[in-house]
Image: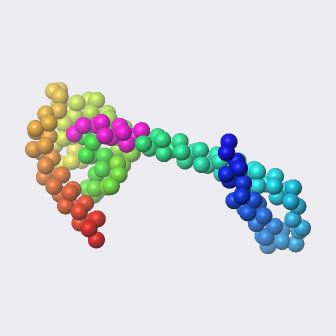
Amino acid sequence: MELEMYMEEARHLAAQCWCDETTSDRIMDPQLAEAVARRIAVWMDSAAQSERNAEFYRNLLDQCVANLGPLAFLAYVSDDGSIQDSPLRLKIPELVAKLSQGYRLRENASETEPITAPIDEEAFWRECYPILCKAAAEFNRKHSR
């Protein structure tokens, strides 16, 4: 644990306990304040580690999206058809399942149909080009303000 990096902020937080309306009439006990600060620092360290872990797994999911082939585009499309800057990670399991079942895009980006052959990339681009153009135009409109 890297508690020392959190101790200064934790001490400030612990000291504020004596500033509350219900405790402001008490004399601050430095040893108690330090013990409270140490416990706060443990929680801060735990929260920071949890965030590092979450970021690690978010990055793994983003790497999965990058390997979805032609279906990767769908990870950026919201249910209302709007295009997002980052993948909608909630969609990844569904897209992986579709990819593993050999699905192919139909003209509507939110619908798919099963096929037995591998994805025909030429057909995919022919079908998806209008969708991609619309998405690019929306993205440019959204980010050119």
Q: Could one spot residue 112 in this view of the protein? A: yes
Residue at (78, 70) in percent of width and height: 20
Q: Residue placed at 22% from the left, 39% from the top?
A: 70
* Left or right: where 71 falls relative to 63: left
In which image quadrant can residue 121 be found? Answer: top left
Q: Position of residue 91 (x, y in %)?
A: 35, 44
Report whether 71 appears left or right of 42.
left
Instruction: Identify the residue shown where x is 10% and y is 44%.
Output: 126
Using the image, determine if residue 103 lies above or below residue 106: above
Q: Main secondary structure of the magenta part?
A: helix
Horizontal placement of 88 versus 122: left or right?
A: right
Residue 107 appears in view: no
Looking at the rendering, the stretch of residues picked out in magenta corresponds to 60-70
Q: Is residue 61 magenta?
A: yes
Vertical comparison of 28 with 52: above or below: below
Q: Nearer the viewer, residue 117 or 49?
A: 49
Q: Is 91 on the left-hand or right-hand side of 29?
A: left
Nearest the eye: 39 or 120: 39
The relative height of residue 114 versus residue 106 in the rendered view (above or below) is above
Let me know if residue 69 is in the magenta part.
yes
Residue 131 on image: x %, y %:
17, 52
Which quadrant is the N terminus positioned in? top right
